[in-house]
Image (spheres, rainbow, N blue to C red):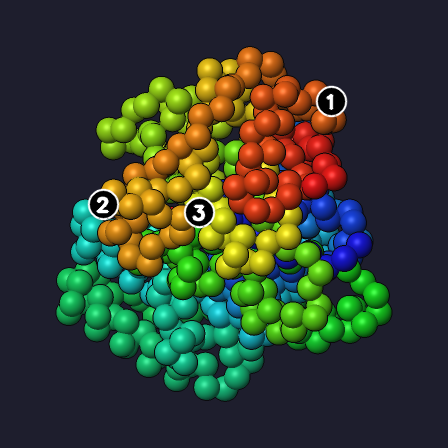
Amino acid sequence: MSNTIAVGIQWGDEGKGKIVDLLTPDVDIVARFQGGPNAGHTLVIGGEKTVLHLVPSGILHDNTLCLIGNGTVVAPETIVEEMDTLLAAGIPVNERLRISDRCQLILPYHRALDAAREAAKGKAKIGTTGRGIGPAYEDKTARRGIRLIDLVCPELNEKITENLTWTNFILREYFKVPSVERSDVDAVLELARQRLLPLMDDVTLILHERHKAGDSILFEGAQGAMLDVDHGTYPFVTSSNTVSGAALAGLGIGPNMIDEVLGIVKAYTTRVGAGPFPTELYNDSGMDDASGRHLAEKGQEFGSTTGRPRRTGWFDAVVVRHAVRTGGVTGLAVTKLDVLDGLPEVKLCVAYERDGKRIESIPADAAMLEDCTPVYETLPGWQEITFGARSAAQIPVQAKALLKRIEEVCECPVTLLSTGPDREHIIHLQG
Ligand code: GDP
Ligand code: IMO
Ligand code: MG
């Protein structure tokens, strides 16, 4: 099996967890390279659901090494809670997981800053997951972040004092909210010392050695291309690069280690949080199109991390083409086809219109994108049930026509088709 980067190519929640878990038996290593506990990756095995935020989605498999790379931001309490849930379910997580010595820690003051900023923005808020992601990546880039390795460095106390003094000043004086207690930070650091230091390793070195020995690697992205800090709908994005290129810097590997890029994409579109969404049909703030409600209800579109209702809309090929380009995507895994079952017709946005002009690519400015109207192609729907289908023969001709059109307009072959949340609900296609 080749080395594959699996990335989301819409606004997150495309079904990355399911696809990564499903492909894990073909690889030796699964590695996360960016993002943090803003991610919520769902795995369903025999009807039993597991939601992972930081632990890679290969963790349920024996003989698979799971790695968390330097590009990620790790919240000690979240990962320890996740590890405890897995341990209670009989998964020997300590044997299977290694965390980069260079990864950044999310500490309580990052979450306080995230919350204070969002509250201050009021209606203009980004709608972050509130997990402290932005402030943690800011500290990293500002070169004051606390990395896992810092837990064994003598200067840690001093660094924390400096960071906390600065953050508390901003919280108190600018945002007029309470400071973060030093004891709360120390408690998290102590937890990290006890539970994460034993798993700390040079992840880059492990990858290079295992690659040389012939092992294969699956790289697991978080979020999606449209949430990428450079290529997404800035500023309504997350604070990391989410495109496949981030796997290289986020793990310390070169492009020569990569064979394939799998773009994971829903058969429609969802978004959680604020920001432009041209094909939007349905949301909890007043948009109530019947097809959009069908997608939200049948797709059970609620955030895996925050439980917030997701906004829903038709498949947007302008978005997916942009993502295929920015990610060098070589194949598509189309998920949630079954959610379209029963719709009288299905729409596909192939371009936008703005000021009477046809637009085929994503404008750089969020306000301009907000201003775009979708140009739709309408295809016939189907009344057959595809839920749980495991062979192409079970897929109605109308659904096949939709997939063919997706391949054409996105300029990328569909290699996997997901027909339900369970690991078994999958069809491998030739592409
Ligand atoms: P991720 O963040 O990309 O891993 O995606 P999430 O786990 O946040 O959201 C995807 C949701 O869709 C989860 O509840 C999955 O169990 C579910 N899911 C994944 N693939 C399918 C599918 O093909 N059909 C249906 N009905 N549900 C799916
Ligand atoms: P997975 O990996 C969907 C969104 C938030 C918000 C924006 C910024 O499960 O696909 P942040 O907390 O990162 O600063 O929030 O990004 N967001 C996600 N949306 N799926 C995710 O992860 C997301 N991670 C962040 O809703 O709009
Ligand atoms: Mg998710």
Secondary element under disc 1, as helix, strand or loop, is helix
Residue 361's spot in the image, x, y percent? 40, 51
How many numbered marks, from 0 up? 3
- Which corner quadrant of the image does residue 400 belong to? top right
Please name the residue shown 27% across and 76% down the image: 166
Report the amino acid beneath label 1: Ala
Residue at mark 1:
393
Query: Is 324 or 292 nearer to us in this picture?
Result: 324
The CB of the residue at mark 1 lies under 8 Å from ligand 1: no
User: Which of the numbered marks, if any, corresponds to residue 319?
Assistant: 3
Closer mark to the observer between disc 3 and disc 2: 2
- Where's the C terminus, which quadrant? top right
Please name the residue shown 19% across and 47% down the image: 123
Q: What whole-number distance in Å separates the C-alpha atoms at marks 1 and 2?
A: 44 Å
Report the amino acid beneath label 3: Val
Closer mark to the observer between disc 1 and disc 2: 2
Residue 256's spot in the image, x, y percent? 70, 70
Judge whether residue 137 can be spotted in this image: yes
Judge whether residue 188 can be spotted in this image: no
Residue at mark 2:
355
Mark 1 surroundings: few (<14), some (14-19) or many (≥20) residues within 10 A: few
- Where's the N terminus, which quadrant? bottom right
State left or right for residue 424 relative to residue 119: right
Q: What whole-number distance in Å separates the C-alpha atoms at marks 3 and 2?
A: 19 Å
Report the amino acid beneath label 2: Asp
Residue 358's spot in the image, x, y percent? 33, 45
Q: Are marks 3 and 2 in contact (CB under 8 Å)?
A: no
